[in-house]
Amino acid sequence: MKKNTLMIMILAVLIVFTHCKKDDKEDPDDRFTLLTTPTWVADSLLANGVDASGPGQLLEDFKGEARFNADGTGKFGEYTGTWKLQTGDTEIVIQTDAHPIPITAKIEELTKTSLKIFTGFPDLSTGQLVTIPIRMTFKAR
């Protein structure tokens, strides 16, 4: 009788463990898929906390769509180039011929419907080593 009770308990524990929901933590492959699946449309392009997407402004050429292809190429508004995830997939690096140095941005949010990144860009107008904080948000289409 003790053997049957023990077997039933072990079976019950196994059933509970196999039917429990997986942990909701994202793995790196999920972040890659979240980034490469949709076409992203610029929602907000801010420099120093102010809209910078208008004509002649700093982020004008990032306006429009962004597409991160699975092969590491992409289109980022008016720019084309390459991209990669780094630092445990918490940052994205975008390289384009239009900019002499790669753009490294922290991924603040990445879901099926929202992409928010933050970076800094040197303010060349001042002649000093001042960085302009930039925040770009995109919606999935």
Image (cartoon, rainbow, N blue to C red):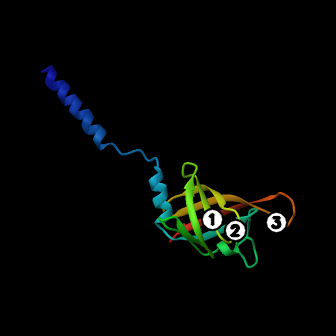
Q: Position of residue 16 (x, y in %)?
A: 28, 38
Residue found 66% across the figure and 71% down from its top: 97
CA separation in Å, label 2 and label 1: 7 Å
Residue 105: image x %, image y %? 64, 58
Element type at marker 2?
loop
Q: Are marks 3 and 2 in contact (CB under 8 Å)?
A: no
Give the residue number, with chain letter if any, for mark 1. Answer: 95
Q: Is 87 placed left or right of 46 in the picture?
A: left
Picture coordinates of residue 117, whole percent (x, y): 62, 59
Vertical placement of 24 versus 54: above or below? above
Q: Nearer the viewer, residue 140 or 31?
A: 31
Q: Secondary structure at mark 1?
A: strand
In depth, the one of 71 and 133 nearer the eye is 71
The secondary structure type at the circle numbered 3 is loop
- Mark with earlier residue (1, 3): 1
- CA separation in Å, label 1 and label 3: 19 Å
Contact? badges 2 and 1 (CB < 8 Å): yes
Query: Which residue is labeled 3 in the image?
Result: 124
The residue positioned farthest toward the bottom in the image shown:
55
| Quadrant of the snapshot with the N terminus | top left
**Residue, x 55% and y 69% (percent of image)?**
74
> Residue lying farthest left?
1
Q: The residue under label 2 is which amino acid type?
A: His
| Count of picture labels | 3
For mark 1, does the 10 Å Cα neighbourhood hold few (<14), some (14 to 19), or many (20 or more) residues?
Answer: many
Q: Is residue 6 above or below residue 41?
A: above
Which comes before the other along the chain, label 3 or label 2? 2
Q: Which mark is residue 99?
A: 2
Residue flagged by tag 3: what amino acid is it? Answer: Leu
Spatial CA span between label 3 and label 2:
13 Å
**Residue 46: quarter of image:** bottom right
Which kind of residue does numbered mark 1 sit on?
A: Gln
